[in-house]
Image: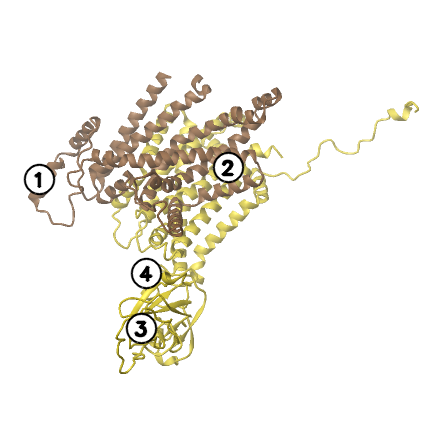
Chain colours: A brown, B yellow
Amino acid sequence: MLAYTLKRLIAGVITVWFIATATFIAMHQVPGDPLMNDKAVSAEIRANLEAKYGLDKPVTEQYFIFLGNMLTGDFGISFTQQNRKVNDIIRDHFPVSATLGLLAIFFAATGGVLWGALTAVYRNRLPDIIIMFLVILGISVPSFVFAALGQLFLVNLNSLAGQSIIPVAGWGTFSHMLMPSMVLGLGTMALLTRLMRSSMLEIVNEDYIKTARAKGLSPTRIFFRHQLRNAILPVITVLGPQIAAITTGGFVVELVFAIPGLGRYFVQAVQQLDYTVIMGTTVFYGAFLVLMVIIVDILYGFIDPRVRLS
Amino acid sequence: MSLFEPTSADFEPLPRQEKTEQITRPSLSYWQDAWVRLKKNTRAIISLGIIILLALFTLIGPLLWSVNPALQNLNQVSQAPSWAKSAVIIAPYQDWDGIRLEGYTSPNQIASAVPAPTGFAMADTPTTQRVRLIWDQTPGADGYNVYRNNRAPRDFNDLGLPLGSTYGNELSYEDRLSLEPRAYYYSLVPTDGYDEYEVYSQLILTPVLAITPDEAVERGLVTDPSEVNIGDDITIEFHPFGTDYLGRDMLARLMEGARVSLFIGIVAPFLFVLVGIIYGGFAGYFGGQLDGLLMRFAEFVVALPFLLFMILFKIAFGIGPGESGIMPMLLALILLSWPSTARLVRGQVLQIREEGYIEAARLLGAKDHYLILRHIIPNTMGVILVTLTFAVPSAIFTEAFLSFIGMGVAPPTPSWGSMCNEGVKTMLSHPHELIFPAVFISITVLAFNLLGDGLTEALDSKMRSRD
């Protein structure tokens, strides 16, 4: 188990290094730079600025400085936001995105397992048909449409109540997080419901379910102890990659609901060619995602003994 | 009850009546069989029909609905969907003096209460050019406020938009504030010159859609003002899906946008699936260290941040104003999306490589390229087709997502995603601007998803052996 964990971690570090390098190369291939703006800057000021940010050095040297700083966890200073460190931007805004993402994952996972189990129990009956129709809808409607509809719903709800029950946009309290995280988790929830349903239906025909039934266990016990616990496994497997999907989807939801998350700053930085912020957030996101996938894989080993053996 | 007495006849063999082995169903190839099974799946067939309709909408639609999608008309901004409508030709606007009382003097004392105004009526036929209101003098009042509401007011505090105030001697009001041919609820509240009395009179009216001869020429309905007479009915241009925030026809824009969205949604998956087949097939067939190396590289490509590279391509291509930015998006999608197909194909090829029939073909002297083209690729086609159908919705989503955050196609080229982006800004007042493109995206994605489900079932050999 330890060897496996170590192996995965090393592979993860290599992946992060690759992301960092690819991002660095790509950033320096693009025409234009962050010092090029509307204001005419004299050659001297420009030279000073380049010296300040280290842009006057050869690209290879810049690359090694960048890698060295990254190792110490220092991503440099933002070009466009005066005197703001990339680390500060990440520290201030990542918790917001992470809270939103985790809440969304929570909604998606509980909802997915619940609805999936329900459809399997009521197979080919009305609840199954209704839920599966909603699932197909959830997969087919883009997240920004859900975000807009969610906001519209809140506006109508608040105007009907005559007061602001749930805030329409912004960030701060739990009620602020409710709608955005639900919207964010909706697509994933639909996907997990589908997965859960098929894995539940597969397990019904397994031998150990027949054995349990033959032993005379109550249907409730079979359902919870044998069926549900085994059916959840594939859901956990896709949870790792789904975290990645949730973070990218987070950009849109943060945009629509005016949430000060990292995604918004990332999009903004890319538009303004803010080198340090782009590279910092990309490497940070990449490392975070790699770590998440590794954690999920290791957790999976704890939950499913079969994986541990092989 | 007598016992059964067997006779010799009972031991005669029965004549053979039917053949033991008979082909009852016509012999079908893999694809014929899949097609038969797909045809039984109603949802998949309906989806296929929707996809064909969408293709027709995109290709033939612009021929039938030949409105220029880029034509802006600031007179008709954000109009709701409407069918063929006609307008009345009216004379150009002329000043109206209204009704003024001669020798009017304000009341000496402010009355504590006044009755509701009487005689609240329209002076003439209301048109979308102007609505003229008149009323009788209310004793005790020294002024009037006029309100307009789009729905029936609930109470005194819900009279709607305050249009204006008049002095005590003015017993008329002319409303020219962006009138539309719909029912309006006008309310008249008497005042003491400053404060309102809590009484009001109400008038419900629907202005007639009207344009002047000059406007008709401006909109290109007639070539000369003399072609129409005052009072004539004229058919004006209509927008079945409404107009957007610049007065552009939504239907024409949806057709134009469909080209972009469906082009990206269909061409990009085709190309990246092709790259994936070649890459994965190569890795899987030759195996060994080369396979490990190729697959490790594919894993790295998966880890690259899509959004960043998409934008880098866009900038690297030097997309200037007026260019659509479709090509960089296509390129980014292909360069970053192939690894999943490559992995899938590699897995399939690894599996098929070990099958008995490949061994047999090799023993018979088949060469590598024959094996790949004749045996391996056709046998992976089912899985590839399913991947392709599911890749289409994800590509359409990606395009919509990028255009929505303003990183996709550049204006003025419409795409469904960028139309949604524009529609979101006005979704509270003009929901149709968001709803139509969103519905088109959803229906397309839904159709491809259901078709993909149907294909999975139809092509799955496990399902085949079941019936």
Mark 3 element type: loop
Circle 2 Cα neighbour tier, 10 Å, few/some/many (<14 / 14–19 / ≥20): many
**Whether label 4 touches label 2, CB < 8 Å:** no
Where A284 falls versus B176 (above or below)? above
The C terminus of chain B lies in quadrant: top right
On the image, which quarter does residue B228 sit in?
bottom left
Residue A239 lies, in percent from the top left, at: 40, 31
Mark 1 vs mark 3, foreground winner is 3
The label on residue B246 is 4
Q: Residues within 10 Å of mark 1 (few under 14, many from 20)?
A: few
Quadrant housing residue B186: bottom left
Q: Which mark is residue B207?
A: none
Q: In the rendered image, which residue does mark 2 sit on?
A: B382
Q: Is residue A303 above or below residue B57?
A: above
The CA span between labels 1 and 4 is 45 Å
Chain letter of the residue carrying label 4: B
Q: Position of residue A103 (x, y in %)?
A: 37, 35
Q: Is residue B97 left or right of residue B272?
A: left
Q: Is residue B10 left or right of residue B309?
A: right
On the question of residue B68 being in view, the answer is no
What amino acid is at disc 4? Answer: Leu
Between B112 and A223, which is closer to the camera in this rendering? B112
> Separation of disc 4 and disc 2 at Cα?
46 Å
Q: Contact, CB < 8 Å: mark 3 with mark 2?
A: no
Front position among marks 2 and 1 = 1
Chain designation of label 2 = B
Q: Earlier in the sequence, mark 4 or mark 3?
A: 3
Q: Nearer the viewer, mark 4 or mark 2?
A: 4
Q: Position of residue B252 (x, y in %)?
A: 40, 59
Question: Mark 3 Cα within 10 Å, few/some/many (few <14, many 20+)?
Answer: many
